Structures are given as structure tokens and as C-alpha cells.
Amino acid sequence: MRVVDLIEKKRDGLPLSKEELDFLIHDYSKGRIPDYQMAAFAMAVYFQDMTPEERAHLTMAMVESGDQINLTSVKGIKVDKHSTGGVGDKTTIALAPLVATLGVPVAKMSGRGLGHTGGTIDKLESIPGFNVEITTEMFIELVNKNKLAVVGQTANLTPADKKLYSLRDVTATVNSIPLIASSIMSKKIASGADAIVLDVKTGSGAFMKELADSVELAKAMVEIGNNLGRKTVAVISDMNQPLGRTVGNALEVKEAIDLLKGEGPEDLKELCLTLGSQMVFLANKADSVEEARVKLEEIIHSGKALETLKTFITAQLGDDSVVDDPSKLATAQYQIEVKAEKSGTVEKIIADRIGTAAMILGAGRATKESVIDLSVGIVLNKKIGETVQAGEALATIHTNRENIAHIIDMVKHAYKLSDQSVDTPTLIYTTVF
Ligand code: URA
């Protein structure tokens, strides 16, 4: 096989076979195909798209380029959840104990945050002692025992995707539905999931800004999953403003704990119930999505989900007393209010500006090497549709530095106020099966 012939075939809109895609991905990951040829191939895909069969084959070729986590010794249907990324997205921390309480095994590999969105691993590390670096044997043992464990990504998962994604980043080929969908799905499949629930974010703070693009991406990923024998469902949820009221590691953990206490913000609760009921249903732990939702609400009210969270924290050597007393989480030295200059109703909160402000404060990483401050972040006192009086706080910055005028300014300018009343935005747009 000659790479140039395959590039030409794709350039002319013809589908590639499984063998051809396997060859491309395998030889590229081994360094036998140069970046310039792979870049030309990615650009051909960008313009010519791929058939559903090609997308599934590309995904599997990337899965097979590295380690695959074998979860066969974990009893039950392993349902993984993936979010395409957003600001203030602490869903996993509340959702994992919720579904685990109903017997859904959650064996989660998570990443650290980079840029303006945070990572679950960093958030969990704001619990004193919490250890995410456990062996695969321990990981599986804990999932069998407690139905829940979270581990940092250490295995060599989908190296071909890693290499191709970096190349796409510098060749203007990230924004291609078949390439994004196969990239995300390859990581989920390599992590050992039997079924997958995707949270595809849409809006100004999301990777996909337009609803139609988010739906197209969701359909592409659901199709890949189903074609590869993994039941897959995607929920399209709003990211026109941060999720919940907190952005920053320890602050987000507290908010997730609040949710399991039956408190916390409505949007976070609604998203957890929506994603959770799909996970419980896919794992055969309820006869319908509606029944799954009722069960999830019951275990929040009974406190059982909170107990699972404590068991999970203790099993990974964390201090579970943070659940009853969240003041034991890392706390910043100063709280500085960002005050509204006029009265009005919040019309807009530019999510990625809030995310970037939190990152500059120290809550996120500008580069892979940055050291983060788990205690800092931003609390949104006001969200879209809420009224504010001049001089009242729009947001509160939790910081360990006093001199943060530029960050106060950024947060202030992330808000747009209106003289008119403003509706609360839709949270869940649609579900793709
Ligand atoms: N996230 C991924 O993992 N891959 C992409 O291609 C885009 C976003």
C-alpha cells in the first residue's frame, strides 16, 4: 500500500477500507508515515468526510494503537460517561456515586485539566489524602467492592489519537466531525466501557458553539459506539454559562457534595439526573429512564448516595470528613466580590472568560507543567435570568493573591446585563440515541 494513493482516494471522496485505515493509523503511530502525509490525509477527511463504516474502522484502529483496559473481571455492565468539556463541570463527582449507589459499576479513568476547563482528577485531589494513582488491580478490586473507583490516566491509551490530535491542532483540521468523533470514542472504548453516555456541550463556552454542530457530533459518536457494539446515548446540554455556581477545584467539589445532600444548584442537579438516568437504564438497573430518575431522586433524599461518596473517598485514602464539613477542603485566603455597576438582569455570562479568569487565578493550567492552586476559583452569585442591584455582587473571587484587579475586570466583563427580563436558558436540548 502506498500512502499517497490513500490520500488521493480520500481527496477524491472515495471510502477507504478497514485494511487501508489500519495501515495508515498503525504506520503513522510507529513513525513510518511522516506528518506531512498524515496532515494531507486529515485535510482530505476534513473536506470529504467519512462513511459510518470508515468512522468505526478509524476509531478501532486508534483503539488498537495502544493499551486497552480489560474490565471483564468487573461484574455488570460498565457504563462510562464523557463530557466534551465545559466550565464548572463537576458532574462526574456527583454522578459517579449516584449511579454506583444503584449498582452501576463505575470504573472511571479521568484526566487533568488544561486551559480553561478543569479536570476531574484535579478536583478529586482537593480532598485531603485522595489518591488517584492506584494500580489497575486495586482499581478493579475497588470497583468490584464499592462499584466505584477513579484513576488518573496512566496507561498508554490511544497513542495514535494523541499524535494525530496534536497534528490536527496545527494543521486546521481539529474541527472535523469524523475526526473529533473517532478521537473521543477511541478513548472511551480503550478504557473498557460496555456502554457510553455522552454529555455533548453546546454554546459559547463549549467546543461546539452551534446547536446543529453539537447534534451532528453527537449523532456521529452515537453511531460509532453502536456500530462497535457499545450502546451509546448522547445528551446535548447547555454551555452558554458555567454549570452550577462554582468554578475552581475545591469549590466545585463542595458543590457536588451539596448536590448529594439534596442542596446545590438546580442546573447541576437536573444534568446529573438526566445523565444518571440514562446510565442506570443502560446498565439494566431500571426498566425505564423515568424509573431510573425516580430511583436517583430517592437515593439523594435518603442520604444513600452521600454514603457512597464517603465510601469512595475513604477507599482511595481521602479524608471523608470533608463531606460533613466541607470547610476542611482547601480554602483560599481572600474572598473578593465583583460588584455590578448598574442594576439589571443577567443576559449573558461568557463561560470561557470565567474559565480563563479562574485559570489565571491558579485554578487551571496554562501549560501541562503549571502547578495549580486547588483552593482558588470563582463563585457566580448571579446567573442568567437573575436580577442584580447596582453594588450587589455578581460573583465572588476566591484568591490567595490580593492584587487581582485584572481578574476582577475580566469577571465583570464576562457579565452582560439587560434592562429587560431574561428567560433562564434551556439546559437540556435533546437526547440522541
Ligand atoms: N476532544 C478530543 O478528545 N478529540 C478531538 O478531536 C476533539 C476534542
Image (cartoon, rainbow, N blue to C red):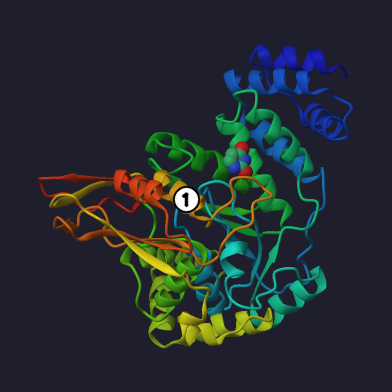
- Within 10 Å of disc 1 (Cα), the crowding (few <14, some 14-19, many 20+) is many
- Residue placed at 45% from the left, 39% from the top? 214
- Residue pushed farthest left? 420
Residue 177 visible in the picture: yes
Relative to the observer, which residue lies in front, 95 or 414?
414
Tell me the SS state at disc 1. loop
**Residue type beneath disc 1:** Gly
> Height in image: 304 above or below 359?
below
State the residue in front, 400 or 252: 400
Reply above or below: 70 against 42.
below
Ligand 1 near label 1 (Cβ, under 8 Å)? no
Q: Residue 305: tell me if it is visible.
A: no
Looking at the rendering, in which quadrant would you find the N terminus? top right
Q: Residue at x 64, y 39 (%)?
A: 182
Q: Residue furthest front?
A: 403
Q: Which x, y percent locates residue 235?
A: 44, 52
Query: In the figure, is residue 177 to the left or right of 382?
Result: right
Residue in view at x 31 percent, y 66 percent:
266
Q: Is residue 316 found left or right of 84 in the rendered image?
A: right
Instruction: Judge by depth and name the residue closer to the eye, 94 or 120.
Output: 120
Ligand 1, what quadrant?
A: top right
Q: Which residue is mark 1?
A: 86
